[in-house]
Image (spheres, coloured by chain):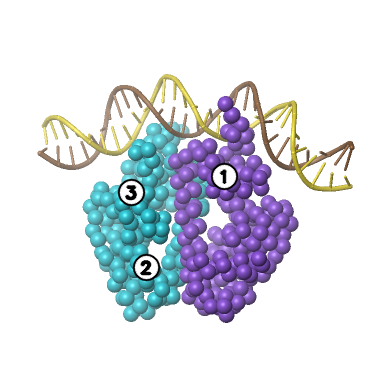
Chain colours: A cyan, B purple, C brown, D yellow
Amino acid sequence: MEAKEILKQHIAKTATLTDEQFDYFFSHFKPLSYKKGQIVISAGEKVDHEYFVISGCLKAFFINDEIKMYILQFAMPTWWTSDYGALYNQTDATISVDCITDAEILCLSNHDREKICNELHQAEHFFRWRTNRGYLASQKRLLSFMNNDTKVRYEELLSLYPQLYNLVPKHLIAAYLGVSRETLSRLYNAHK
Amino acid sequence: MEAKEILKQHIAKTATLTDEQFDYFFSHFKPLSYKKGQIVISAGEKVDHEYFVISGCLKAFFINDEIKMYILQFAMPTWWTSDYGALYNQTDATISVDCITDAEILCLSNHDREKICNELHQAEHFFRWRTNRGYLASQKRLLSFMNNDTKVRYEELLSLYPQLYNLVPKHLIAAYLGVSRETLSRLYNAHK
DNA sequence: AGCCGAATGTGATATACATCACGTAACCAG
DNA sequence: CTGGTTACGTGATGTATATCACATTCGGCT
């Protein structure tokens, strides 16, 4: 299935757009191809776009002290990603995004999103719901962080996204869980 | 300033409504008065409303194992609160909300919010931005959780909301930070 | 004023995890 | 194939924090 159709079905779950409206909506997206390891957003630079993943897997991450990396999100097909803080507030990125695998993505500028939201009520509706889902997911993750130990969070992550186990290296999973790679290694090798 | 005016100025920061439109918008809200300690949302029960705080301070919290409490949010004037997961998905509440102090709040049903969003494009715009701010705040807190130790998070919280120091008991601050009350006590009593 | 439960301080001990260190295996590019 | 980089496993040790226990103080009621 091509990118346009994937986005169309994704939007259709929350908003009602005529074919003409969707064509107009889609005309603001630019398709991009990335290779494994390529950088999409680099901390310290300006951010003008958000990204909708068609295929592949990206990560959005924060690096502190030039040393420790924390992964905010693994972005899989039909997920959106960006440094939304920087994007909405027009500040420099503090979060970076790069490709864990080769990836096809659709790119939408901040300006165009606001323009479309203004022009099409249903587009605004869609983006409200998208953000809402992100908010709920973030809150759920925060609660899990406070409430569960690493092992439970690890199993939670894998039961939610089993494909991650073979797709991304273990030290990235550790960076998502917020523990060291050594601790994670010991956790699932404590067989029995 | 009365409740209606507070809400009006709050909305005006993100959305443009005529006086007539705002009057219509406001007509869906119901003012309520609560006493310190009163319960607004009780885990396990249905949730039909979200709440806009006019005065006082509420907390939204999760209780695990009938023992440990984690505070998701201190809701201060002009903040919104509810169990949004339960509200949007029409499931039973997993999060409770109660009053830390006496409070005046405005209450809006889930049904009415969706109705207004559908009728007034600018209302949908407002709620998109409100949710967006919540999402960014939640993401920031998550990052701080992974990246900073308890002391830094404690200072972060107090520099953001200095009034909390005298307003809420320390064990609630500990429950927000995700540490035991003993640890928090030792932290700021470790005066050399 | 005086009482009682709630809030807070503080010691002792246990534990999960970070960190450092080192070794091995897998992967890829020349 | 080969050398180097990346991923992964595992031991030893230090540290922040949880937990339990108990003492003390505070604040709201009657």
Instruction: Specify the amino acid type for callout 2.
Output: Arg
Residue sticking out furthest to the front = B1
The residue that label 2 is drawn on is A113
The residue lying toward the viewer, choosing from B62 and B5, is B5
- Residue at point 56% right, 65% down? B10
Instruction: Let me know if marks 1 and 3 both belong to one chain.
Output: no
Quarter of the image for residue D23 reads top right
Residue A131 appears left or right of B29 = left
Task: Decide: is A184 above or below A14.
Answer: above
Residue B73: give x, y in percent of width and height: 58, 52
Instruction: Specify the amino acid type for callout 3.
Output: Ala
The residue that label 3 is drawn on is A43
Find numbered disc 2 in the image and state the secondary structure of the residue it sits on.
Answer: helix
Tell me the quarter of the image containing the C terminus of chain B: top right
Subunit of label 2: A
Residue D3 appears left or right of B84 = left
Instruction: Characterize the local packing of mark 2: few (<14), some (14-19) or many (20 or more) Cα atoms within 10 angstroms.
Output: some
Quarter of the image for residue A46 reads bottom left
The residue that label 1 is drawn on is B158
- Residue at point 23% right, 58% down? A33
Instruction: Specify the amino acid type for callout 1.
Output: Leu
Residue B44: give x, y in percent of width and height: 64, 56
Tell me the quarter of the image containing the N terminus of chain B: bottom right
- Residue at point 64% right, 41% down? B170
Find numbered disc 1 in the image and state the secondary structure of the residue it sits on.
Answer: helix
The residues bearing labels 2 and 3 have C-alpha atoms spaced at a distance of: 22 Å
Residue B167: give x, y in percent of width and height: 66, 48
The residues bearing labels 1 and 2 have C-alpha atoms spaced at a distance of: 35 Å
